Amino acid sequence: MRLLILIIGLIPSVAFALSYDTELPYTDSAPDLATKVSVGALTEEGILDGNPDGSFRFNKLLNRAEFMKITMLLHQGLQGRSFIDEVIILSCFPDVASDAWFAEPICRAKQYGIVHGNSREGVDPQFWFFEPSRSVQYEEALKVLINIYDIQPDLCIECREEWYEPYIRAAKGRNLDLNLVPGHKLTRGQVGRLVARFVALDQGELQKLIDAELGLHEKETEEAKETEETEEVQEDNSTSIDEDESSVSSGSSDSSVSSIYDSDPDATRKPGFILLGEDSPALAAVSIFPEAEPLDVTKITVIFTAASSITSIEAVKVYNENGKYLGRANKDATAGNRHYVLNVKNGSLVIQKQETRHVYVRAIVSGHKSGGVSGEDVEVQGINIEGDGYWSNRSYNQGSSDDSPEHETSQSVVGGVSNAGSAKELLVAGTDIPIGSFKFAGVTSGGTSDLRVTDIVFTLGLGDGVTVSNVEMSTPGSTDRLSCVTAGTSVTCSSIPANFGTFKGSPRTLVLYGDVTIPNGAQRPSLQVVISNPGRIGSAGDITWTDGTSTFQWVPFSSPVVRGTYYSW
């Protein structure tokens, strides 16, 4: 079995310029532009390689053993060392045989403290398993890469949270994340994208990589353009559902022949922003369960709420539960001014009796120059499924009852807010003391779009009588200061100037200073600055920002948004 990385001589710390115009040398095609760019760039530099048959198998899951082979080669390069003369104990986990091909990288990682195995309560760590054949999960990959690139996890000393949350926060704050959920099993293509981001960060080219993934790189390849044109032809007004689903006797299983699959494996439905010119996150879903007989689906209608502004919604992509593209639903004024309809060819989507199938949808969103409008609220009211009974030919009409999350269109998106300082520091009293620093990062759709924070409300966590006054904001390298208003435990920094608040193109760090007083006799004084409330559509949170056209008062994160450095004795 050939691994994803086979080039032993790779030294990632040697300076090189990633190329984002590389034609992929593989016999199969990347599922999307972002994967093509990342895998192409890493292939060009010898970081990635394919299979003996010439394929890459972008959508194949990668197991933990294969992932450790990749990361330990990266680690070797970053350390600028040779492993030849190092002695490694190859009996490091009960489920890792000493003669297995993956024993060396896994046991080397354990010896360096990069991995420890899967903890089990009440079991001695020496008996913890590694599970080398299990698919590597998103949060696991982030932790390993963050460790080998020596990135500080975004720790919260007093939080009760899952072990992976500091690593996800650290990745989001540096634009390293792929916006996947914990537990998501990574494919080879996704691992390529994730590794590319860390390599690009190490080379100071992360924003260049992200721009290329979004199609903003000025030398976007002809192959990518041809791929987009092909998809436009396939996404016509009728349907692109494969004919291989027409036989009821064969069930409703999907064939991979001539199929298109969703380029984003995350179909989680949650409130968020929709970047103009991009496909939206998953907006809604519906379950289909034919009770009495097989169902021959003939029409799928996506209906937006009356409160939605759908100027930017060009069309809607429809997928099944496996991410297979079923077709493009276009706006149909005859059905209603909020209705997008996909007409399905008879016999092309037959669902067996008492078999549960699912359909989910993403919007195709116009770019700003093509009529896309920032600040539009978008919410799906429901998805209607129409069809005929396969035996009785009786008409069926089923609508979704699941609640769908709200979204809002924008030219930019705040991708992460993280603690830019240490997790914990010694608390000192005095004037003009640094009390917290926060890093803002995000992406834009290019052009005239902006990405700038204008107002922030901070909450002071004060212990044992500590007080803070005269709070000011600045940014590293600047002598300018912005005075903020303190009221109790609330600090409001308003009208943040553009030279402080802009983080288009690269992350921005904001630092708070204040006069700190510790009362005599204090036993356990403490101080921590927190941005608490993320807000939601229609309800203002602690961060106000602009994309250059619209002003937003919420960010798509959980509460608290971020905790700063914890200062104490």
Image (cartoon, rainbow, N blue to C red):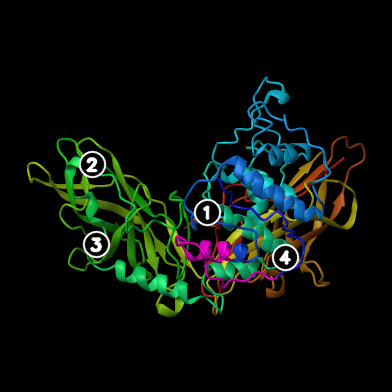
Residue marked by disc 3? 239
Dot 4 amino acid type: Gln
Residue at figure coordinates x 42%, y 64% from the top left: 279
Q: What is the CA distance from the residue labelled 1 to the residue labelled 3? A: 36 Å
Query: Label 3 neighbourhood size at 10 Å, few (<14), some (14-19), many (20+)?
Result: some
- Count of marks overlaid on the render: 4
Which one is nearer the viewer's eye here, 517 or 259? 259
Q: What is the CA distance from the residue labelled 1 to the residue labelled 2? A: 34 Å
Q: Which mark is residue 203?
A: 4
Q: What is the CA distance from the residue labelled 2 to the residue labelled 3? A: 20 Å
Mark closer to the chain start, 1 or 3: 1
Which one is nearer the viewer's eye here, 239 or 69? 69
Q: Report x, y in % for residue 447.
A: 54, 79
Dot 1 amino acid type: Pro
Mark 1 and mark 3 in contact? Answer it, CB < 8 Å.
no
- Indicate which label's residue lies in the foreground, 1 or 4: 1
